[in-house]
Amino acid sequence: MGVGVSGWRLARAVASQGQLGVVSGTLLPVVLARRLQQGDTDGDLRRALAAFPFPAISARILNAYFREGGIQAGSPYAAVPMPGAQSSPALIELTVAANFVEVFLAKENHSGLVGLNLLQKIQFATLPSLYGAMLAGVDYVLMGAGIPRDIPGVLDQFAAGENAELPFDLAPAPSGATPATAPRLHFSPRIFVDGGPPRLRRPQFIAIVSSAALATTLARKSNGRVDGFVVEGELAGGHNAPPRGPMQLSPEGEPVYGPRDVPELDKIRALGLPFWLAGASATSSKLADALACGAQGVQVGTAFAFCEESGIEPSLRSETLALIRAGAARVFTDPLASPTGFPFKVLGLAGTLSAPSVYAARQRVCDLGYLRQAYTREDGSFGYRCAGEPEAAYLGKGGDLADTLGRKCLCNGLLATIGLGQRNADGNEAALITAGNDISALGRYLSPGRETYHAADVIRALLGQAVNDAIQPA
């Protein structure tokens, strides 16, 4: 869910209640670095780093980023190296450690299950992210926003203590240019362990799909075992799969989905693998419907995103819940916002990047780089560009101006949503909040006089039990 919204606290709360708690793996190196710079007041991050099996790496990370008492108000966060085909050793170490920390804390003090969610679109960080999560004993890996057919094999290799590699996408070469040869991404556990890395437990791999065709491809043509699917419809928050066929927009400017976009559950069921349904599925009746059609259950995002244990900055969460109580919460499926080209759901909230004036006033910058795409230069080498970076820079790299229109910086906006927005001379980065279409239904957790709710309340409601103010997550 976004960046840090489904963090270790939320995943732990859900897992403690007997369900699968999932942490978002997106931008975790930046999240860890900035939280350490905020002072790690409760000491949780330092406790997890002390359990990291490579103490020299923990020491280097603390020396680089930890600030006792936190950095001075208004001071910018120290930069984290940008990811690429050959990320710096410091970034690789930070990525492994950040994923370890998040999963370690999510699994602490209970016997429940914890998963890690990654995006296929964010390729450069995938290998060290998976290895770090596996070092912490992650139980499941969930992956969507693309075709993650190479991930099962990577999990097998890491479990055996072996090196792993992945291809990465490269934009087509300009007309007349020599196509670049895209190198593969490599990761070796041996860079951490002299004498051979440990064998690790292989997590279950769950692919997030929107169609039976994609599920069939992954089940039959992946390089290892696929253990199941989350079947996600267009009502879910975050990135949505584009509609099949030519893009058509509604009068409001949202992508139009039709019958071809409805997943054929009978074909998915026929694959013989477990599956869960996602997208506006957070009610006991939807759970019952899912079970009746052969699913194992449902995946829920939005209902948990605005509970007390979520990572959303408290004031933004309060403002959103006030909109919900007033019946004024709206989500727009924006076909342009994401530099990935996938539709992205944006919650309308004053003062955030959903407001045209806030978006127009923001000075474009690409200083994190997680959604950059590799492209071929005229000389046959490759570089990186992002449709959300300054237009002149994007055009100078052979990009099309049309691709920059309406693009938002998801990296910076989503970090601001969890209180980790960069501070700069023009002011702090504005937040960008994503949510699913059923956000207005969250009022069911807010009885008269109740201002907030907990993850345990969502689970009780899903299981058909009464929401109880006295119930607290374990």
Image (spheres, helix red, strand yellow):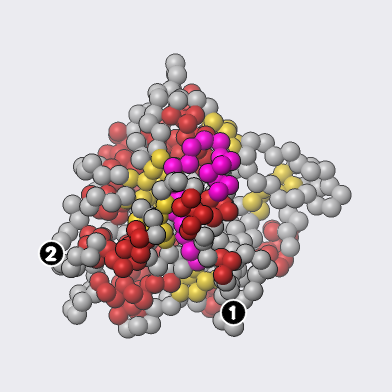
Describe the element under mark 2 as helix, strand or loop. Answer: loop
**Residue type at the position of mark 2:** Ala
Nearer mark to the viewer, of 2 and 1: 1
Question: What segment is highlighted magenta in the picture?
Answer: 216-234
Q: In which quadrant is the N terminus drawn?
A: bottom left
The picture quadrant where one finds residue 101 is top left
In the rendered image, residue 221 lying in the magenta stretch gets the answer yes
Number of the label disc, if any, that sits on residue 470: 2
Q: Please name whichever residue, 395 or 346, is drawn nearer the observer in this view of the structure.
A: 346
Q: Please name whichever residue, 31 or 15, is drawn nearer the observer in this view of the structure.
A: 15
Instruction: Tell me which residue sits at (58%, 41%) in the image.
Output: 221
Residue 291 in percent (x, y) is at 34, 58
Instruction: Tell me which residue sits at (30%, 33%) in the image.
Output: 51
Q: Looking at the picture, does residue 421 appear above or below residue 25?
A: below
In the rendered image, residue 285 lying in the magenta stretch gets the answer no
* Residue picked out by circle 1: 250
Instruction: Tell me which residue sits at (40%, 40%) in the image.
Output: 204
Cβ–Cβ under 8 Å for marks 2 and 1: no
Number of the label disc, if any, that sits on residue 47: none
Q: CA distance from mark 2 to mark 1?
A: 44 Å
Mark 2 or mark 1: name the one nearer the start of the chain: 1
Res 370 seen here: no
Residue 276 in percent (x, y) is at 40, 55
